[in-house]
Amino acid sequence: MDPARRQFLKFTAAAASSLAAPQYARAQAYPTRPITLITPFPPGGATDVTARIMAARMGAALGQPVIVENVGGAGGSIGVGRLARAPADGYTIDIGQWDTHVGSIIYRIGYDLRSDFAPIGLISINPLLMVATTKLPANDLKGLAALMKAHPGEVKFVNQFAAAQLAGLLLEKLTGSRLLFIPYRGGGPAMTDLLAGQVDVLVAQAAATLPQVRAGAVKALANLSPRRSPSMPDIPAADEAGLPGLHMSGWFGLFAPKGTPADIIARLNGAMVAALADPKVRTRFTDLGLDIAPPRQQTPEGFAEFHRGEIEKWWPIIKASGIRGD
């Protein structure tokens, strides 16, 4: 080989190595201290429970504690705002969902849901259940539709977050009748009143409603999905329960601030994927009515595509509905 050519190749190899070295060294070192996982809702709810399951298993994979920090308020937008302002170093992430990373446009938010966050991976698809007080004289969506038509504006429907309100509006559209929307600030107080028979119908994630259904304290009218969920195959999907097209589901995923280095995102994603492969985690998710995301959507790229599709699907509907946050 020509000496000049040999010298050029040595130089380019050395340059490439010097450029890659800092990134490799950073990936090897990260993390060197605890990681904060922002949960944008108060303790005790489905988001908090899921975050703590993931934090424990991811911490073991990362070799550093993952500490859950509850930052509630304004439908989760306060916690997400804190993530948007956090350093892009991998030490602050959040567990996001439909309400916080799609539906929160009903609030005045100081960040861009499309560009201010780096997707890490989709954790789960969370079927929404429509449940009713045991006193309601309807046992499925067909019966609920008949009741609404017989008594327009009398069925008391809990309105505790944007997804629930959209589900209620869609229910009105599909039945050609009206509901009486009862506002609540959280699922806990709403469930308390549902158990007492003070309201009639509630839509919420299965993680929050399934224990009461299994205890016989409330009854499930339908899973608001096109097909039955593997985590609760005994509950009929909306199409077979008598109201085709009444589809609404939630999800959980991890986000980091925009600008977080790709190698750190990959490290966090690897810990997330390892957690979701853990048989104990999978069993716990089944108990909570959560369906683990498909492998493709567990990747940063697959989650980014999924999140973009959710925004494109729901933002026009939300804006047309005129829903506003308090």
Image (cartoon, rainbow, N blue to C red):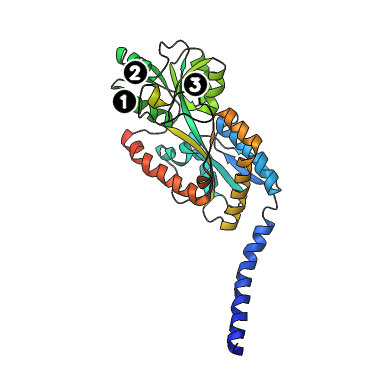
Marks counted in the figure total 3
What is the three-letter code of the residue carrying label 3? Ala
Q: Residue at x 63, y 45 (%)?
A: 274
Alpha carbons under labels 3 and 2: distance apart:
22 Å
Q: Are marks 1 and 2 in contact (CB under 8 Å)?
A: yes
Query: Which residue has dot 3 on it?
Result: 190
The N terminus, quarter of image:
bottom right
Which x, y percent locates residue 37?
61, 42
Relative horizontal placement of residue 190, taking residue 239 as reference (left or right): right
- Is the residue marked by circle 2 packed among few (<14), some (14-19), or many (20+) residues within 10 Å? many
Which x, y percent locates residue 50?
59, 35
Which x, y percent locates residue 291?
53, 34
Q: Are marks 3 and 2 in contact (CB under 8 Å)?
A: no
What is the three-letter code of the residue carrying label 1? Leu
Q: Is 56 drawn above or below residue 190 in the view shown?
A: below
Which of the marked residues, 1 or 2, is nearer the chain's N terminus? Answer: 2
Kind of element beneath mark 2 = helix
Query: Which residue has dot 1 on it?
Result: 174
- Is the residue marked by circle 1 packed among few (<14), some (14-19), or many (20+) residues within 10 Å? some
Alpha carbons under labels 1 and 3: distance apart:
24 Å
Kind of element beneath mark 3 = helix
Which of the marked residues, 1 or 3, is nearer the chain's N terminus? Answer: 1
Residue 112 is labelled as: none
